Image (cartoon, helix red, strand yellow):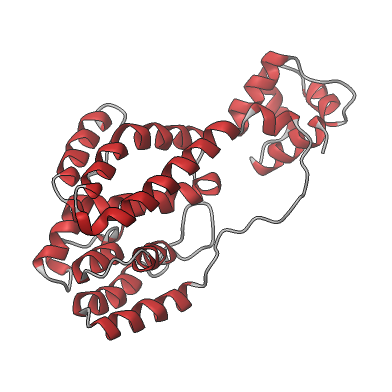
Amino acid sequence: MSIGTNIRSYREEKEYTQEKLAEALDVSFQAVSSWERDEYKPDLDKLLKLAEIFDVSLSALVEEKRKLSMTKETIYNWEHMKTYVKTTARNLQLSDTLKAIDFAVAAHEGQTRKKSDVPYIYHPLNMACHALSMGIREDEVIAAILLHDVIEDCGKTLADLPVGEEAKEIVRLVSHEKTNDADRDAVMKAYYDGIAASPKAALVKCIDRCNNLTTMSWGLSRARIYRMIGETEKYFPRLLKVIKGAVEYNDAAWLLQYQMESMLDIYKRLM
């Protein structure tokens, strides 16, 4: 698509009229109309402002969009993943995991992933499958993975969780209070310091981050993507080092580092 077509597409996606966009850019609506008809091209300063307003990269705005393939928000069916995790938990006699999975499904009912219709439970189930595929078999770890967001997002407390104390402690460590721009750095430092004291909590958090990195292109704004990249580079090398220090997690640490760094490199090249 042309620059004009891209401008129109992003404008309509943001539900801006030509007049509203023109006002934001301090130009006439006729100028916006001429851009969208490809009669004229915006100057560089206007292109940069358009990219900021639409929350996209400059390249996304000016490059021709090629429909090489359809993207998809999910790879696996969440109900199939639920069946797999339950069956595996029964076979391995993971009692906390069996209790956690039904609790998590009920707690997240009606919730969806950001900017999508994907049921939120897809996320913890995907993480649980990720852990099992790496050979992680500890009951408390898989249970904590399934429950890792229920305190932050579902209004649950540690006392509500139908699992043992070790799983509860992992969930406590990977849950954090709400932040704002003023206190975020201090809250995040304390949060990651706590996680770094526990190899199992570090493992859960790294699996969580890998999963979030794979979905942030459609689930987060451009500003939030930049923030996630920065926080990943700042805090996660330490967590990976903690995981590597636990012999039983050596293979998982290698795979998690590879996935995390590969995703970061891809995003930075495309951003």
- Quadrant in which the C terminus is drawn: top right
Location of residue 15 in the rendering, given as x and y in whole percent from the top left corner: 66, 41
Tell me where residue 207 appears, x and y as whole percent.
35, 54
Q: Is residue 147 visible?
A: yes
In the image, residue 27 sits, relative to residue 74, either above or below, namely above
| Residue in the picture at 79% in, 36% down | 64
Vertical comparison of 14 with 48: above or below: below
Q: Is residue 147 left or right of residue 262?
A: left
Image spot of residue 102 (x, y percent): 30, 77
Q: Nearer the viewer, residue 252 or 231?
A: 252
Q: How many marks?
A: 0
Q: Residue at x 39, y 31 (%)?
A: 230
Q: Quadrant of residue 169?
A: bottom left
> In the displayed structure, would residue 126 be above or below residue 63?
below
Specify whether 42 is left or right of 116.
right
> Can you name the residue that lies furthest to the left here?
165
**Residue at left 55%, top 39%?**
266
**Res 7 quadrant in image:** top right
